[in-house]
Image (cartoon, rainbow, N blue to C red):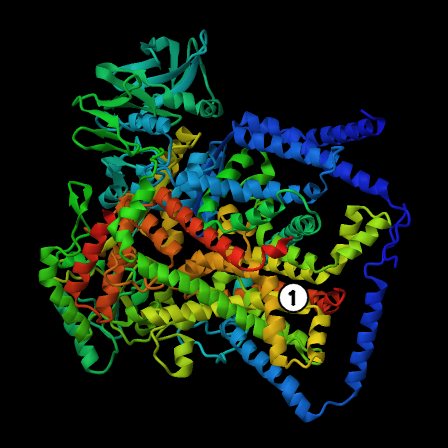
Amino acid sequence: MTTLAVDPQPKAAKKEKKAKKDKVALQKHKPMSARTWLRTLAWRHAVAIFAISFALFPFLWMASAAFNNDNDVSNQQLIPPHPGFNNFQILFSNPNYPYTSWIKNSVIIASVTSFLQLAVAASAAYALSRFRYKGRKTTLMTILVVQMFPQLLAIASIYLILADLGKSIPFMHIGNISALIVVFVGGSLGVNCWMLKGFFDTVPQELDESAKIDGASHAQIYFQIILPLVRPVLAVIFLLSFIGAMNEYVLTSIIIGNGNQSHLTVAVGMQGFISSAYQKNWGPFAAGSLMASVPVIALFMFLQRYVVTGLTAGSTKG
Amino acid sequence: MSKKRFALASAVAAAALAVSGFAVPAHAAGKTLTIWADSTRTPVLKKLVAAWATANNVTVNVVSQTDTNSNFQAAAPKGVGPDLIIGAHDWTGTLAASGLIEPMTGVSTGLFDSGSISAFSYNGRLWGVPFGTENIALVTNLNLVPAGAPTTWASLESTALALKAAGKTTSGLFIPCGGANSCDPYHHAFLNFGLGGYVFQNKSGRLNPKDVGLASKAFLANAGLVDKWVSEGLISKESATGDDYSFKTFFTNKAPFMITGPWELADIKKSGVPYQISMIPNPLGTGNAAPFAGYQGVYLSHYSTNRLLARQFINQVVSTDTFQLGLYNDQGRPPALLSAIKAISGDKDLAGFAAAGVGATPMPNIPQMGSVWTDFGNAWGAVLTGKLKTAAAFTQAAANIKKLIG
Amino acid sequence: MKIFSVKTPSKTFGLLLKLAAMGSINGFALWAIPLLLRNHTYGFAAYFIFATFVLDVVYFSRRKFIPAKYIAPGVLLLMLFSVYPSIYTGYVAFTNYSTGHIIDKKTAVSEIVANSYQSLGDATPIPMTVAKDAASGELTLLLTLPQVGPEAGNAKGLTPLAADSVTQDSKGVITAAKGYTILTSDQANNETDALTALKVPGPNGSVYVANDLQSAQQEVQSLKYDAATDTITDIQSGATYKPDSNGEMKSAAGTILQPGWTQVVGWRNFSYVIHDKNFRQPLFQVLWWTFAFAILVVTTTFFAGLALGLALNHPKLRAKKLYRSLLIIPYAMPGVLAALVWVGMYNQDTGVINRMFGIHVPWLTSPWWAKAAILLQQLWAGSPYMFLIATGAIQALPSEVLEAASVDGASPRQVFTKIKLPLVLLTLSPLLIASLAYNFSNFNAIYLLTGGGPLMQNSGGLAGSTDILISYTYKLAFSTGEGANYGLASTVSFLNFILVASLSMYGFSKSRTMENMN
């Protein structure tokens, strides 16, 4: 089988990138005066630190509850008087609340969902960005407007759909993770597609036209030119979809919340855990919520290098 | 059709046939019963049904639910619901009015506590078979009150106030409510009933949703007493300030009395405070007050395709001492079968709860109760925080509730 | 410049992939459609036929439907899981679907009649064995009637069984009978529906019915249905019940039989929304806050996100990656759980915010503080999203334009207000409008934190100071009257949608997005 050797980025852009890198490297060697540092960077650090302390405060509060062996919500201190891992131990040792399975389920659902959502939305966005056909504007508007329908009631009819489909198609049965994933993918086209289309539009048309002249098919242009160029946006949307699926509560609890405890997601499982005994479960709850954000943060850190290359991807424009 | 196209079409057809070749899933043979229950009861239920399931060659699936009631309402008419659900008695009206459950037949009601039977009755029929009851009782801290639980409201009041005056305690009678903003009136309701109020007029076993009595004449005449008890510190304001963390005041010997249910027993024991569980004295007159009571039982789905088998399960499993005592041992809630209640009469705590539950008021099981909780609770929130006088708060609540019920 | 080199296009591989995918889809359809038809879910069968047909045409037709190749999968899914639910909700808005009216008329009538059978006298169960007539195969109940003895009952009536033709166990249960085949309990269970329907006529108009698989009961019917006149009659009193306009059987005296059924009630729910005084009274205040909430949430989170995006977007800024990862954390925590944490933090007496700053702010209990509390929590929860998309948009800004501007001597402020901000806004305006629309019906944000409270005084006892339109109307639909009123909730959802959609369309036409769409 022959492989396709395609250069994802125009050589000119690469050159430019290299030049930029050199420039940055040069500047790095040049020591920055204290005044310039104050003027250009100090305030940025200050803003970041202020924002981070706001963002992290509730998180630290949870952390202090999580590591507090007293498990006493009314007299909780920011620095726990008796720190320890009791809550984590409780969380992992309760067979009625299988936390590890919850995390595993959440990650599986979120990964598959975000991959499929991305695939569906990106190809739709490609068509909407690159082809001119009758009904294009209508498609764009419909996609967005449909998304504005208040979810809360639509959920009842989604339940009815699954109840009917599940009778014939086992994997679409209520209680099935795959049914949840299909529902997630089916309802997600709107915002993702718009966001992607916006970024696809920034990739100059000349690129695909010259490729076309070279004999590339529309599929080759899509997979080998456009997609690599918008990788940062793909990364962002993957992340957004991942978070969305991971943290979704209402649909998840209705579709898979009825079954076995070990089939739940973190969001649904933890909510049930805390509402069954608020005071008693507060500490383990804090520990579990704390850990629930670990997969997302890990994914973000992993994707960050793609997100940052957005700097250079943007520069190919024009 | 060109050659290429023909090849393509046949390739698709071949793949299609290959995929569709997967067999239609076979239907499981034998008898199956599906039961939905909440997650805390699921494990013990599984154990309790096992023997019957084996003996009768039935597969019994006990499935844990996050919200049994609303899941059941959505699933049952679609044919994806269970055969039986385990739930609280106050679902009766909603489920029966919507035609989702079957009336119970062939149940010997005389074998059950009469309150539990009336709790599951609606429109003159029985819709569920009870297996557990729960009501609140007075818990006395014997460190602070070595003489034991008071038998009259007056002695409860004087004891609490004397301890407070002596600086030994910070609060009198702690009645949980969950915060002024989201006050749950469940624990406080005995005061309403004791002072002449009622939620719905009970006319020979049928509740009249048009007659809301939270601001009945008799209650308004006595409402000043509540204001007095709140201001003098007999009724603790703590429950309105926050979540029910204020149980701590009792556990740390800062409150002589509190009112709670069997679900708190484990924590009370853990705290090490010597305690006594007894009836709540009637705030007016003698005898015991009539707190709200809740009952658990099993309902039979109208959409069950195994309804006769399910009835057999109810008669042969749920209505037995083994089942009811098994749940009692696991959950700490007194059973509903009289014979089972008798079997555990040696339990001192249970006797206390049972004494407090004599003549208790089942939480109304008609659908209109949904319009009551919020305003009922808000009224107590306003009274406990001193925002409104009792009479004003309940006059307003009753007016709102009447408007909501329409 | 040649930027694309097609060496040997691997067309065969692509074709194989396509064939495999389309083959699976067609195979799946071939497998699923008969099952869907067999289960009487014709709508879905039609949908699958349509979807498969569309996909086949798009991917195999000689005509080039190139754009459709990319859009069809998404749109087909969207139709099933977004468009259809919306249309269904629109339909429910015109029905009386609510507690007491959630089943169809046929089921409701049969239930009313079935539930009118009451056991006669004491409910002592009659020993019963399920059998089939060996000759005719007819389902038969073999009963051991007290004081009467063994009898065989079918739909026609009771037939006494000769004592020597039956075998009974110690409890009187018939274990064998001449001329009858006893069913095993598995077989009997499979006949549940027929057994439930079987009413064996007994003395004085009573009937014997199976109570479970081993016992029967003597019951008497009190209501009967006449299909010709569509009425239910009380057998004793003779009172008749006729269907009323609300989908229930009602007598002349006004007595209603439960359950009722779902039926189309036309514009009734809409007229209720317009005419009901209790609903209208607080409507102005609720609407005012709905708009304020949506606009404030989007603007505060967007500008916070944009400011952070700009501040952290400097090539020489150290620890940039770390900052970004930390900033994303609020977004990484499941929203339901985070809201619970915030409720705890806002507690007036035990909450960490008041304790830390030594203040006594009634965060969730005063009308204005509760609004502030919600906005602050939303700022916390929503900024990371805005930060992410703003960072993306900033990074996609054409650097040439920015460079050109600074070469032309524009100050950094001018570059920002005249160039960066408009360009970023242009890229993000569809998302901002979508976000506005989302927050307009952001039920969870309100519900989880304050539940809409604190209660507005003089508002009919329902509307809270932080209720937005959607949360207020859900309260209206679910905690008034006789339980949940889905019809009314759908009506308001529908109206809410019309309002949001038209405002968004207006927003789009005003923004330059539409012109930019070409």
Q: How many marks?
A: 1
- In the rendered image, which residue does mark 1 sit on? C392
Q: Is residue B20 above or below residue B279?
A: above
Percent of width and height locating residue C113: 29, 25
Whether residue A104 appears in this view of the structure is no
| Identity of the residue furthest to the front in this view | C408
Q: Is residue B227 above or below residue B263?
A: below
Identified at 57% across, 65% down, the residue is: C385
Whether residue A173 appears in this view of the structure is yes
Mark 1 belongs to which subunit? Answer: C
Q: Is residue C513 above or below residue B103?
A: below
In the rendered image, which quarter is residue B73 located in? top left
Q: Residues within 10 Å of mark 1 (few under 14, many from 20)?
A: many
Q: Does residue A237 appear left or right of residue B112 in this picture? A: right
Q: Does residue C15 appear left or right of residue B310 in this picture? A: right
Closest to the observer: C288 or C444?
Answer: C288
Closest to the observer: B172 or B96?
Answer: B96
Identified at 58% across, 83% down, the residue is: A46
| Identity of the residue furthest to the bottom in this view | A34
State the quadrant of the N terminus of chain B: top right
Percent of width and height locating residue B133: 30, 49
Percent of width and height locating residue A288: 54, 64
Q: Does residue C206 appear left or right of residue C77 in this picture? A: left
Identified at 81% across, 66% down, the residue is: A13
In the rendered image, which quarter is residue C491 located in? top left
Closest to the observer: C13 or C516?
Answer: C516
Looking at the rendered structure, the secondary structure element under dot 1 is helix
| Identity of the residue furthest to the top in this view | C135
Amino acid type, label 1: Gly
Percent of width and height locating residue C379: 49, 69
